[in-house]
Amino acid sequence: MRTIAVVTSSRADFNHLIWPMRAIQDHPDLELKLLVFGAHLSPQFGMTVNEISAEGFQIDEQIECLISSDTDVGMARTIGLATLSLADSLGRMRPDMLLIIADRYEMMAAATVALALRIPIAHIEGGEISAGAIDDAIRNALTKMSHLHLTPHDSAANRVASMGEAAWRISVCGAPSLDHLRELTLWDSAQLIAELELPESGPLLLIAVHPVTLLSDTVAEIDALFEALEQLGGRQVFCFPNADSGSHQIINQVERWVNSHSEARLFVNLPALAYFSLMNAADVMLGNSSSAIMEAASFKLPVINIGLRQQGRLCAHNIISIPADRAQIIEQTQRALSDAFGEGLADLHNPYGDGHASQRIVRALAECPLGDQLLLKEPQ
């Protein structure tokens, strides 16, 4: 029996990890241990630890570490607190492997502790690019600290291999968030409107915008979006930003906007069923979220990807990438809403997978060697 410890720090990574965790639970040779920390335990960000319990997962460790701050110093201090607490938790637990995902800065704490404790690390979604955020450097650092690489597509796998990782350590699995689309029965439009108390008519704009963490002013690109939204109108549905430097400013700006625009809504946290039902019903998605890049193609949903944050990501042709410029946001959103653009997405294929990532991930976790063979990397 192999013990796989999974760490999750926010609603974003938890939604990607639900089906891999279920697959670990269902595997006869694997045992799941779950460590919850970061924004999951923050009332401001929705106390999503409760959602984890509601999904039926047993939480083995809860780790308070998120500094209530809106600065880069707060982010750095959060990493420090998480490192101290995770050292105690993982030191007691001593799993056979630690499973981490993506590129959140808190994951550096988990990987650093595991490395010091000689716990092999399996990393989901390495090899991606998001050049406008610190996420890119974090993701690459996590790749080099990890021992098993569960990548979303061939280009990512090739990039991991180019970093000197041996071929046997790399598996192309797809993005596990897409497994929701195979497993869930989404709400229809009427149920979505009723469940989320949305206005009934008008174009539905789904908006997910996060701080751009490599800019000195992490919210510098936000004003152009709001200037454009004033003209675009429609039903504007906002999702909460990540807990990064500048997130409080974005939250305050969105709350003021929603309070003065009767057709606008803000959701602190949406369970996977609600979120993907919303994505399925939306007419266009705007912002700078990786969700728009990785998941929207499965719904043939047009996306206006704004600014620097996701620069370099592999994109399907539903993505329109533009600078943070009011006129371009308006022009390209109107283009995305046109019948001609929608008809051009009829044969769209999502390059991030087929909804079976979890099975591939768990197969790799169950079949890879353990001990020194996994820990000791070959010179390349």
Image (cartoon, rainbow, N blue to C red):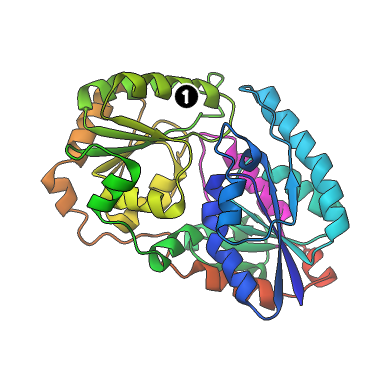
Residue occupying the point 35% across, 64% down: 185
**Element under label 1?**
helix
Residue underneath mark 1: 250
Categorize mark 1 by other alpha carbons within 10 Å: few (<14), some (14-19), many (20+).
Answer: many
Position of the C terminus by quadrant: bottom right
Q: Residue furthest left?
A: 339
Q: Residue furthest bottom?
A: 28
Residue occupying the point 31% across, 61% down: 349
Q: Is residue 145 magenta?
A: yes
Judged left or right of residue 166, residue 252 is left
Camera sees residue 256: yes
- Percent of width and height locating residue 173: 52, 67
Q: How many marks?
A: 1
Judged left or right of residue 162, residue 378 is right
Quarter-of-image position of residue 332: top left
- Percent of width and height locating residue 137: 62, 40
Query: Which contiguous range is marked in magenta?
Result: 125-147
Residue occupying the point 39% across, 60% down: 351
Position of the N terminus by quadrant: bottom right
